[in-house]
Amino acid sequence: MTTAAARRYLMCRPTHFAVTYRINPWMDPTAPYDNALAVSQWETLRQTFLDLGHTVELIEPLPGLPDMVFAANGATVVDGKVLAVQFRDAERANEAPAYKAWFENAGFEVFDAKHTNEGEGDILLAGDVLLAGTGFRTAHAAHAQTQEVFGRPVITLQLVDPAYYHLDTALCVLDERNIAYLPSAFSPGSQAVLRRLFPDAIIATAADAEVLGLNAVSDGRTVVLPVQATELTAALQAAGYRTAGVDVSELRKAGGGPKCCTLEVRS
Ligand code: ARG
């Protein structure tokens, strides 16, 4: 385990959160949702990060973009460089320029995405390397661009379960050396890659994954994860991590958890 450092996160208040279309199996536009509850759950998540000593910056939520709360999909930011995104679905397309503008205004060097690329939803920094998911959203070709932009090795991982459509729904980076993941969300070859790279990984149960337990945010010491992920919480504590359980069940109706709401800004 590494020592926790204060992190800088970008988040977007779910002012316009709704489930009005279906672009992943979690979303049911006919089911009820509670916008006010989503906002209060999100506020608790934000406060949890502040209590841990992290900085949270905010991007203005835009009307007509109900998924904009999922800031992880807004960019990939490593070493002060920003790779902008390109969404697979038209419903989310207009989020990309909004996030790009936020980073430009904040003074970052921004690279345009040349292929479908859903940012930190599919591209996660693990120590020195980037783990990159493909199969549902981010295109395989985007992995090559990611490697080129950041000058870090990119390890392609093939996602195979539609319920775990973004890498960050099936795998959580815990610190510079270890991860937690759901093996069945990956192809056999990608499972072998993960076993080789992370022999001591924490293996999540199906029950943990079903509450989006792996959609967690770790600062290397404390893991902020859905409170419903009880087995994963116990496994993390047994491995020496601290845990902070949060309830973002209203946002799960759109297929998102704590990590989806959180984009790490690494300078
Ligand atoms: N409804 C959103 C979508 O399907 C959820 C995005 C969740 N974000 C994430 N990083 N996994 O695109």
Image: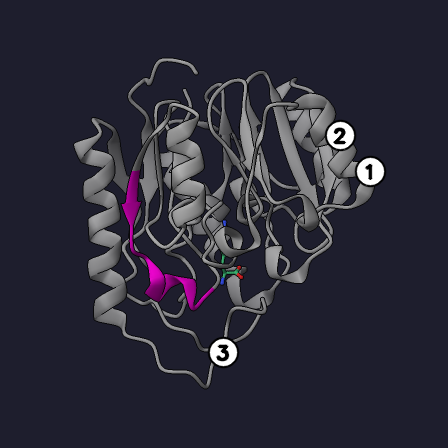
Query: Is residue 226 shown above or below 40?
Result: above
Mark 3 vs 1, N-terminal side: 3
The image position of residue 244, as x and y in percent, is 28, 39
Task: Look at the image and give the residue range highlighted in magenta.
Answer: 244-254
Identified at 58% across, 69% down, the residue is 25
Query: Is residue 63 shown above or below 157?
Result: below
On screen, residue 142 versus residue 75, left or right, reads: right
Residue type at tag 2: Val
**Residue 247 seen in the figure:** yes
Disc 3 versus disc 1: distance between alpha carbons?
Answer: 32 Å
Query: Which residue position is annotated with label 3?
Result: 28
Query: Is residue 140 shown above or below 179?
Result: below
Helix, strand, or loop for circle 1?
helix
Badge 3 density bin: few <14, some 14–19, many ≥20, Cα 10 Å: some
Residue type at tag 3: Asp
Label tally: 3
Classify mark 2 as within 8 Å of ligand 1 or not, answering yes or no: no
Query: Which residue position is annotated with label 2?
Result: 193
Between 29 and 146, the one lying in front of the other is 29
226 inside magenta stretch: no
Which numbered disc, 3 or 2, marks the residue closer to the eye? Answer: 2
Query: Which residue position is annotated with label 1?
Result: 189
Could you tell me if the residues under marks 2 and 1 are in contact, i.e. CB atoms within 8 Å?
A: yes
Residue at the right extreme? 189
249 inside magenta stretch: yes
Between 213 and 4, the one lying in front of the other is 213
